[in-house]
Amino acid sequence: MFKKILIANRSEVAVRIIRACRELGIASVAVYSEADAQAPHVSLADEAVCLGPAEAAQSYLDQRKVLQAARDTGCDALHPGYGFLAENAGFARLVTEHGIHFIGPTPESMDRMGAKIPARETALLATAPVVPGFDRIGATDEEYIAAAAQIGYPVMVKASMGGGGKGMRIVTGEAELQSALDGARREAAKAFGDPTVFLEKYIENPRHIEIQILADRAGNTLHLGERECSVQRRHQKIVEETPSTAVDSELRARMGADAVAIARAVGYEGAGTVEFIMDPSGGYYFLEMNTRLQVEHPVTEFVYGIDIVQWQIRIATGETLPFTQEQLSPRGHSIECRICAEDAASGFLPQVGSVRVLREPQGPGVRLDSMLKPGLAIGADYDPMLAKLIVHAEDRAAAIRRMSQALNDMCLLGVTSNLGILAEIIAHPAFAAGETDTGFIARHFADYADPQPGLPEQLAAALAASLLGSRVQRGLEQTDAASPFHSYGNWSNA
Amino acid sequence: MREQLGHGEQRFEVVSIPGSAGQATVRIDGTEQSVTDLRVEGSRLRFSIAGQHYVFDACVEHERIQLKRGSAYYSFSRIEEGSEDEGRADGAALSSRMPGTVLRTLVAPGTAVSAGTALVILEAMKMEHTIEAPQAGVVNGYPHAEGARVMPGDLLVDFSPADTAG
């Protein structure tokens, strides 16, 4: 087993990995930027190393600094989490060359699956279905235009190195194609350092269904069922669940077998996710493989009772999976909501602020993976995701009720978040009916506005304004984060 | 004390009249409302109106009041007297709503554009956001050049709506 692991990430995932290390008896080293000095992962880890300024390129994405931190603290392994350097094969090589184990697949499998164009080729070799597209590297713009016409509009322009909706454009006609190519290339170059884009037939409002893979070095490649991640805004997931209402055990076995074949084709090791899109008739197509831990891994952990992060670490030490595919079966239903600092009423724009009131939900089958703590400043330097709320219950209806209650119990004030719209999504009849596809938000929440305040809300706002004190005091910096009413003048706290 | 609160486009004036322990009167747009059983527990605000009990979580920071009841969130603003800006809607549409970088300015100053024309590409949190003309008008210029860092509220386009242009 490893002695000390450097966690090359921040936020809730760093906290998640520290927990796994603790349970395995492994020391953990956090890294952080100057903007994250107060973040929970810094204080939770056994050691912490400041990498530099807030700008990710000078901290979390600076390979030399991250490597140096691992060497200086005597780490024998490094966990990349997701995002930042997690799918950077060059970084995995660099770390490995310096005698530090990179917890993840080999750089060779990352190369094959990390870029979407070679990944499509691999899926074809594994005889898995792929989306019709055009992905010839080095093609001219004229060739893209001709290919798009042949595929048939609408088409999607996607970054080969892309993910998380970045470097992605939907194009409905030839007139928009050139600007979409340019914009996607710019975004891709900036976000991933590679402007290569490709075209794919745009399948309107598909379901997004992905298969979790676990593979050990001995060649045992297993799947842990599907996750449905169709509820998205800005092409980014906000609600995920397993099982999917669109997948029965027969389909799960077929998609699982395709995903396992793709993983085997690249000699995959560790945890990974094969993403598919599913059209309304149930036909599914390979989309991409994420060669890392997935944000939404907790729903799978709940229904399979398996700690995926611990297994990433154990597989990296050479342990063999002690269960077979036949021994794996999901139990109950799990749903995850991503809590983000964003304003759903203004197009999900990211928000800044600081955590003034925080109450975390609790109870059986409730899990909160979080970077939140009272007083924490939420800046604009990184992804707006703050926490993930995950529930598990006997069946889907019970999981929906549990999530509704947990969202009701949770309270986050001081930064505008999507908690309000998440509660409305979970309570929506179409969600209850399992009618989820990637058009869900646009269909049901296109003109989303915050709820209209009634008399009780107006009174509460007036009382809150008064209780804070006079206009003179209003500008005073609050020092007691837990008590927004630290000066409430004449009012009696009866 | 008297002040004006806002919620979206709505404005209402409130006067809070402190009463004895647990009692208060709040006049909202001229109508008096009696509040009883008023208690403050940390961030929690509890009160009754006409026998109905309500529990809110509340947070007041500077000009902003945030409330939560059940799983619904509400945001109110405290409005300074005389701060109403006529050009507010246009200004908001052409201002940065988050910290970011001006990536591209798309239309030459002096150009007349129609509503919906893309004017600026702003990059924030590694995503591109397009700022569009809220209505027909003329682009006079860009207060922040390409590459400039901007903060929420910074005006990105100096814009004259068509009816006042020229």
Image: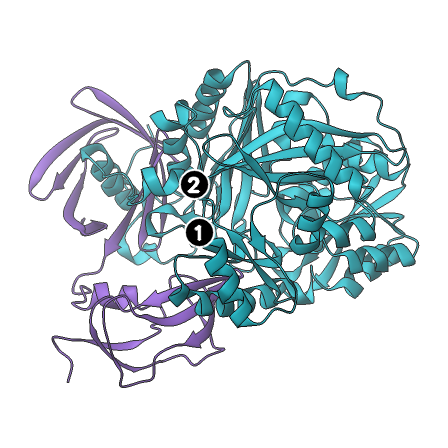
Chain colours: A cyan, B purple
Q: Is residue A350 above or below residue B31?
A: below
Task: Residue type at mark 2: give it.
Answer: Asn
Residue in front for this viewpoint, A439 or B60 = A439
Count every numbered label the image shows and give the total: 2
Q: Is residue A73 above or below residue B123?
A: above
Whether residue A337 is visible: no
Q: Which residue is mark 2?
A: A205
Res. A473 image quadrant: bottom left
Residue in front for this viewpoint, A487 or A60 = A60
In the displayed structure image, the side of residue B57 where residue A180 appears, left or right: right
Q: CA distance from mark 1 to mark 2?
A: 46 Å
Residue in front for this viewpoint, B23 or A442 = A442
Task: Residue type at mark 1: give it.
Answer: Gln
Residue farthest left in this picture = B30
In the displayed structure image, the side of residue A268 where residue A42 appears, left or right: left
The N terminus of chain A: image quadrant:
top right
Residue mark closest to the camera, 1 vs 2:
2
Res. A273 image quadrant: top right
The C terminus of chain A: image quadrant:
top left
Residue farthest front in this picture = A150
**Contact (Cβ within 8 Å) of mark 1 with mark 2:** no
Residue located 66% across and 65% down the image: A137
Residue A131 image offset from top left, x and y in percent: 57, 46
Whether residue A124 is visible: yes
Q: Which residue is mark 1?
A: A478
Q: Earlier in the sequence, mark 1 or mark 2?
A: 2
